[in-house]
Image (cartoon, rainbow, N blue to C red):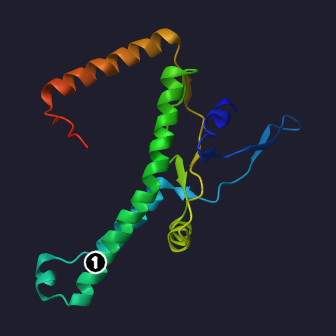
């Protein structure tokens, strides 16, 4: 329940607890999210690209139409990823902010199989109608944790040290005036 409440921000949702009972046997009823896993969508996108990718030999004799189909699929995948990127960043922001700076609660299993996103059909409809995507859903709160204040401080200090080391060994050009 805590996880559900915490991730109800900025259009992100989880599977919602609908009802529960303890007798005659324990049961939980949840509403289903009309989505698929992020890993499934990424796999579908990869298959679309592979199906239209031309080999070097085929490219030499490919028609203009074949090259356009290949380019069109690349652009489609880039657009889908571009639509999914902002809500994924927001999810990461909520996850880190809550874990480090608020309650210390975190979802310890937030991989692509536990992040539910709209299906490609729904994404296509959003692209066609130029409407925002439906919300993302984070599922499977079976592996959650809580960091106490001391552990959060240790983690923040470690992240700052890694950041300083990275800056020392990475050339970052100075910001250009606008």
Q: Position of residue 140 (x, y in %)?
A: 59, 41
The residue at which mark 1 appears reads as 70
Q: Residue at x 60, y 47 (%)?
A: 11
The residue sitting at 67% across, 46% down in the picture is 15
Percent across and percent down for residue 151 are: 45, 13
Residue 52 falls in which quadrant of the image?
A: bottom left
Figure quadrant of the C terminus = top left
The image quadrant where one finds the N terminus is top right
Residue 40: image x %, image y %? 46, 59
Percent across and percent down for residue 147 are 52, 18
Say which residue appears at 15% left-offset and 81% top-offset. 59
Image vertical order of residue 124 relative to residue 149, above or below: below
The outermost residue toward the front is 178
Does 146 sit above or below residue 116? above
Q: Is residue 169 left or right of residue 42?
A: left
Q: Label 1's element?
A: helix
58 relative position to 84: left or right: left
Quarter where residue 121 is shown: bottom right
Q: Residue at x 27, y 18 (%)?
A: 161
| Relative to 121, 166 lies left or right | left
């Amino acid at each position: 329940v805590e996880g559900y409440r915490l991730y109800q921000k900025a259009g992100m949702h989880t599977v919602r607890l609908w009802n529960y009972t303890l007798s005659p046997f324990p049961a939980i009823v949840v509403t289903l999210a009309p989505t698929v896993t992020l890993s499934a969508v990424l796999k579908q996108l990869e298959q679309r690209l592979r199906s239209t990718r031309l080999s070097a030999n085929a490219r030499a004799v490919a028609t203009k139409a074949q090259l356009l189909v290949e380019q069109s699929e690349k652009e489609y995948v880039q657009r889908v990823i571009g639509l999914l990127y902002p809500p994924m960043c927001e999810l990461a922001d909520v996850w880190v902010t809550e874990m480090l700076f608020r309650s210390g609660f975190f979802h310890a299993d937030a991989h692509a199989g536990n992040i539910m996103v709209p299906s490609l059909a729904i994404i296509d409809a959003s692209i066609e109608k130029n409407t925002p995507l439906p919300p993302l859903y984070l599922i499977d709160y079976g592996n959650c944790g809580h960091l106490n204040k001391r552990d959060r401080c240790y983690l923040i200090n470690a992240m700052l040290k890694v950041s300083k080391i990275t800056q020392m060994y990475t050339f970052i050009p100075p910001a250009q005036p606008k």
